[in-house]
Amino acid sequence: MFVNDSGSCAPLDVGRIGIARKIPHHNHTEDCMIKYTPWLKMGRMKLEEVLKIHPTEEHKYIFGTPRNYVNEYEMSRLRLNYSLMLIRVEELKIYFVENYSGNIRGRADFIYNGVRYKKSA
C-alpha cells in the first residue's frame, strides 16, 4: 500500500483507500480487495481515541482456544465471523524467522489472560 505523497502507512494512521470488492472468507470475513491506487492520509489517531471507538476485548482465550490457531471447524462451531481482535497483552516480543523455504516471517510471542501465544505477525 502506498500513500499519495510516496510515503507509507503507519499504525494508527487514518486514511481513505479504494475498495475494489469485498472478498470474505470463512475465517476472514472482513477481507477486501484493495484498488491499486494511492491512499489518502487524512490524519493519525491517538490510542485513547481508538479505545473510545473500540475498547479492548476481554475473553478467556483468543478466538476461544489457548492454541496458536483456530481451524475451520472451530470457527463454525464458535460462530466467529471475524478474525481481528483488539486485546491487551503482556510480555510482547516481535521477531523474524526464516522458514523452510527461505522466506522471512514475522512472529509475535505474548501472554494473554495467563496463556502464552506464539502467532504469525
Image (cartoon, rainbow, N blue to C red):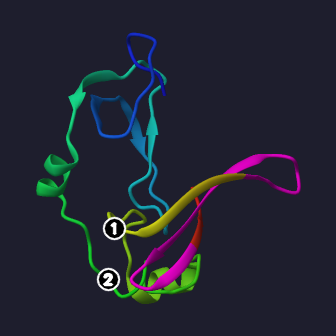
Q: Magenta span covers which residues?
A: 97-117
Question: Badge 1: how crowded within 10 Å, few (<14), some, or many (20+)?
Answer: few
- The location of residue 106, given as percent across then percent down, is 64, 52
Q: Amino acid at mark 1?
A: Ile
Q: How many marks?
A: 2
Instruction: Give the side of residue 28 with respect to residue 95, left or right.
Output: left
- Mark 1 highlights which residue? 87
Q: Residue at the spot x=44%, y=19% of the render?
A: 37
Residue 77 among magenta residues: no
Name the element at disc 1.
loop
Instruction: Give the side of residue 100 with respect to residue 10, left or right.
Output: right
Q: Residue at the spot x=20%, y=41% of the render?
A: 46
- The location of residue 118, given as percent across then percent down, is 60, 71
- Mark 2 highlights which residue? 59
Of the numbered discs 1 and 2, the one sitting upstream in the chain is 2
**Most extreme residue toward the front, as rendered?**
91
- The location of residue 43, given as percent across then percent down, is 22, 26
Q: Amino acid at mark 2?
A: His
Q: Residue at the spot x=16%, y=50% of the render?
A: 48
